[in-house]
Amino acid sequence: MADGDLDFSIRRLGECRVPSPLSGVRFTGDDEHVLHHSRLEEVRGWIARRADPPAMEAAGPRERIFFDPAGLACGIVTCGGLCPGLNDVIRAIVMSLHHHYGVRKIHGFRFGYEGLVRARGHEPVLLTPETVNRIHQQGGSVLGSSRGPQDPAEMVRRLEELGIGILFAIGGDGTLRGAQKIAEEARRRGLEIAVVGIPKTIDNDILFVQKTFGFETAVAEARRATYAANTEAEAARNGIGLVKLMGRDSGFIAAYAALVDGHVNFCLVPEVPFSLDGFLQALQKRIERRAHAVIVVAEGAGQDLLAPPGGSDASGNVKYGDIGVFLRDAIKGHFARAGIEANLKYIDPSYTIRSVPAGAHDSAFCLLLGHNAVHAGMTGRTDMVVGFWNHQFTHVPIPLAVLRRRTLEPDGALWSSVLASTGQPRDMR
Ligand code: F6P
């Protein structure tokens, strides 16, 4: 999509006539926007034409709101894979609804969108400041989660039965697509239901969102694995530490793990293709020169080298082959054939990087996301997700956020820094 076609306008349920009960805060004006581009050179064309460059609505509390908090009921649902900070976001939403706006009826739906389908039999739980008070200290989601879509008509019927005015959907692109369908179905039926997403993905791959919550915590956890890999590699003759990290189609976790730990010598990500031979030759050179090496591979990297296992998960993601095990065996075989001793230690931290409680910075980030989601929902904004862009909280229309997954740019500054840190060849094809 061309930049000029980016339409960041957010759908609203109607006019905001109710004065906000908040006091002592700086209200955000509806005319406040955050630029999509942050560099002067990128916006020069628009300035020359005296046109507004693409920009997103700034998030924050508004002076007038759409919903009357008295009698308003809200719902919260967490979907997809786990992520550090889910409970922090749930808590922040409940606290903000209760304390900022005086909303008293907050339903927590169990096990993702399944919880919105009556026939599934999961009764929603009532969330109060008391019940959520300590949940941010635990990993996971107190509501439970699940993958996969559900029938929008049935979900909207359930929301209507419960008199829900705002649904907060915490999840990745699949969840946001589901949220979009719920918003559309509610509109089709003439119901005043706002649907606000909070972007959650450990892979940090939501479009127009600079950083998703839990990502920093996951990278911090991944550091334990790269530390162990390097310790093992340095202590053995021709030691090789191989770490596989999450990252289906986006290698942000692997890239940042490499930047965090300067001992990583090879970082393999889905966005940058390599050949097995190109990689093994580069690894052999490194071993001959330095007698140890640390490799980080994202789970979605090098899939063209593997036989696909076939099928897809409940979210519709095509199942990937195990690149970690494949590389482990390929490296062992290569050095054996070359008659070079090599001691490889394979570490797959797997779910351990995403099932932990959020770290300090992520916790604060979650709280701010939750508050901004509530402010947006109270104004009747719908079919939107709270974003973070150029270090400010924003509103992003869901149709834009789900256009495709955000990926690392192989010719961008981040990947260039990864190459500078690891010292691996730019091209290993
Ligand atoms: O949410 C993204 C992700 O963390 C991917 O990196 C990974 O492929 C997937 O989830 C695994 O989650 P699950 O096994 O729960 O489906």
Image (cartoon, helix red, strand yellow):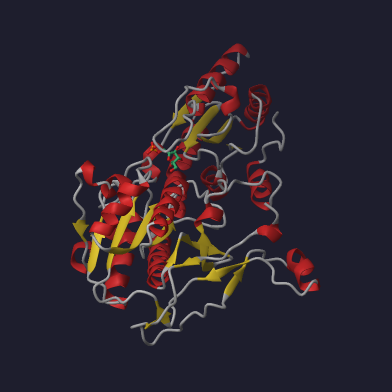
- Give the image location of residue 46, x and y in percent: 75, 69
156 sits to left or right of 222: left
- Give the image location of residue 413, x and y in percent: 68, 52
Tell me if residue 40 comes above or below residue 297 in the rendering: below
Residue 100: quadrant of the picture = bottom left
Closer to us: 246 or 264:
246
Closer to us: 286 or 332:
332
Q: Which quadrant of the frame does ligand 1 lie within?
A: top left
Q: Residue at x 28, y 50 (%)?
A: 116
Closer to us: 225 or 276:
276
- Give the image location of residue 153, x and y in percent: 34, 48
Tell me if residue 17 comes above or below residue 180 in the rendering: below
Q: Residue at x 74, y 67 (%)?
A: 43
Q: How many marks?
A: 0
Any part of residue 140 in sight: no
Closer to us: 83 or 33:
33
Q: Residue furthest right?
A: 48
Q: Residue at x 52, y 65 (%)?
A: 10
